[in-house]
Image (cartoon, helix red, strand yellow):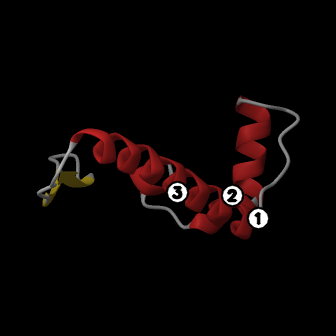
Amino acid sequence: MIARLDVPISMGESEAFEEYIKTSHNPKYVRVSKQSTIRHILKYFTNCKAKIVGTFSTSVNCVCLTSDIWSSNAKEDYISVVA
């Protein structure tokens, strides 16, 4: 959601976000710090990277990369990397 909506990582620390989550999704929600969010994003990235490296290391001798970046008609930004 942070990347898709292009909002700051600190959004999870705001009272408005906490109120929204508690009201709409989970009354037991506890506010998360920016440092925790960053830690979780880095952990997710590391796990995804390890899966990709594991997949490629067993069946691929070389990898070619290409990338592209564009905006949709709805003004949403996208970036892609293809291996």
C-beta proximity under 8 Å, tags 3 and 2: no
Q: Position of residue 40 (x, y in %)?
A: 65, 56
Depicted 27 relative to depicted 66: above or below:
above
Q: How many marks?
A: 3
Q: Earlier in the sequence, mark 3 or mark 2?
A: 2
C-beta proximity under 8 Å, tags 1 and 3: no
Disc 1 element: loop
Q: Residues within 10 Å of mark 2 (few under 14, many from 20)?
A: many
Q: Earlier in the sequence, mark 1 or mark 3?
A: 1
Q: Position of residue 18 (x, y in %)?
A: 76, 49
Q: Nearer the viewer, residue 5 or 45?
A: 45
Q: Is residue 56 left or right of residue 46?
A: left
Q: Position of residue 14 (x, y in %)?
A: 73, 61
Question: Which residue is labeled 3 in the image?
Answer: 46
Rounded to the nearest angstrom, the CA distance separating label 3 from label 2 is 21 Å
Question: Which residue is labeled 1 in the image?
Answer: 33
Rounded to the nearest angstrom, the CA distance separating label 1 from label 3 is 20 Å
The mark closer to the camera, 1 or 3, is 3
Residue at x-position 43% and y-position 56%: 3
Disc 2 element: helix
Rounded to the nearest angstrom, the CA distance separating label 2 from label 1 is 7 Å
Q: Amino acid at mark 2?
A: Gly
Q: Is residue 45 left or right of residue 22?
A: left
Q: Amino acid at mark 3?
A: Thr
Residue at x-position 42% and y-position 60%: 6
Question: Which residue is labeled 2 in the image?
Answer: 12
C-beta proximity under 8 Å, tags 2 and 1: yes
Which of the 4 quarters of the picture holds residue 38? bottom right
Q: Nearer the viewer, residue 14 or 68?
A: 68
Q: Amino acid at mark 1?
A: Ser
Q: Residues within 10 Å of mark 1 (few under 14, many from 20)?
A: some
